[in-house]
Structures are given as C-alpha cells and as structure tokens.
Amino acid sequence: MKTRRLILSILAAAACAAAVARTAAEFFVDAPNSTMMLFDKNLRMDMLDYFRAGQLRDVSIFDKNGGSHIVALNDSSLSIVVGKRATIQFAVLPVKNDTLIAIVETVATPTPDSSITIYNPSDPSNIKNFDMPGPEAFIRPEMRKAAKGKELPPFMLASAVYEPDTRRFILTPTIGGYYTDQDRPETVGMMVDRLVWAYKDGRFVVDNSYRDVLQ
C-alpha cells in the first residue's frame, strides 16, 4: 500500500512539473479562440514558425491595417505587433499552486493604452478583464495632499508590460500625451513615472515594495 502511494505521489509530482515546464509558445498555440480572437490556431502556429525561422513575415488579419508578427519570444512571454497601432504580450503568470495566462493588449489611441486579460488554461471560460487603475492611483504618495481638490483627468491612459522575472506588471502613465501643454491638468505632473501591480487572489494590488521604480 505504501509503495502504491509513493508511486502515485511521484506521478502527481511529475505531472505538476510538466505543467509548470510548459512554455509561453505552447500555451499560445493552445489558447482558446475566445482569448485570442484575432488569431486562430493556424495563424498562431504560422507566426511561431516564421519567428523561429528568422523570417520577418506577417500573417494578415486586416489588410488595410497591415499584418502581424512576433517580435520577441522566450519561455515565459512572447510579444506580437498587431497592424500599425497595437501590440499584444502573451505571458505565463505563475501563482500559488497554479499557472495562469496574462494577455496585455496595448493600443495607440494615439496615446498608448493597455488592458489586461487573465485566464486559467485549465478553465479557459474563467476570463477576467482589467482596465488600468484610475488617475488617483498614479498620484505620487507625497503629492496626494497637494492634489486633493484639484482637477484630475476624467479617465486614465497607461501602458502595461509584464516582467516575468519579478512576476509584476509595470504600468506607465501616458495620459500626459492626451493633452496639450495648455489644457493638461496640474495633477498629471504629480503622477509617478511607473506603478507596479501584483496579481494576488484574483485581483491586482499596488506593490509598494518596489519603491525604486516609483520615483
């Protein structure tokens, strides 16, 4: 009986190790169409083949907007140029006892603005979509008192990039580019250069331990 339990434990551990060892490219190919609506599985495989062969060759989605191709690839993440005005980062997001997938879509409006989608490969129907936090979240801590009562932008524009090494999302405010020098709210100048997000328990939280990138 003990021997059977030991064998089952070894098999379970091996299965977990195999799951963790899956690369971003493998998850990308197997991604459900509901999360990668622009690219069916065949297009995703074509993009990977072209990139690995060193060919700067586009797959076509919308002819008038140009094609798309992979520009960066490693075990944890891949990045795609989509037409002339958008990018997608597809990344493996390890969490406690599980592995999730993060998809960061950034569109030039013309000011870059990102949204983040998180889903579980074992349950692709469980999809969560996140927009950037509001403008007040980007105000520097030492400036919050001075910003109180002042005009804030009515919405927020920010770009996001996932860093696999730290398992953090770096958010860069881009709202300043939406305004001219004459109509830009004073509070835009009170914002941090970057904000760090961590994904915990199904939601994003600001990670203040990364103070070096908040200056």
Image (cartoon, grey):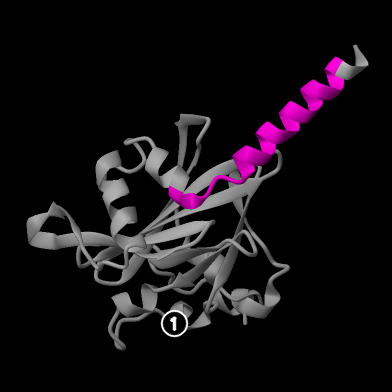
Quarter of the image with the N terminus in it = top right
> What's the magenta region?
4-25
Q: Residue at x 45, y 78 (%)?
A: 188
The percent coordinates of residue 157 (x first, y second) are: 38, 66
Is residue 105 among what the camera can see? yes
Q: Quadrant of residue 86?
A: bottom left
* Residue 74 located within the stretch drawn in magenta: no
- Most foreground residue, 1 or 148: 1
Residue farthest right in this picture:
2
Tally the marks: 1
Judged left or right of residue 186, residue 42 is left
* Residue 16 located within the stretch drawn in magenta: yes
Figure check: 105 above or below 27: below
* Residue bearing the label numbered 1: 186
Figure check: 15 above or below 190: above
Q: Amino acid at mark 1?
A: Glu
The percent coordinates of residue 15 (x first, y second) are: 66, 32
The percent coordinates of residue 22 (x first, y second) are: 55, 45
Figure check: 116 above or below 187: above
Q: Quadrant of residue 95?
A: top right
- Most foreground residue, 68 or 153: 68
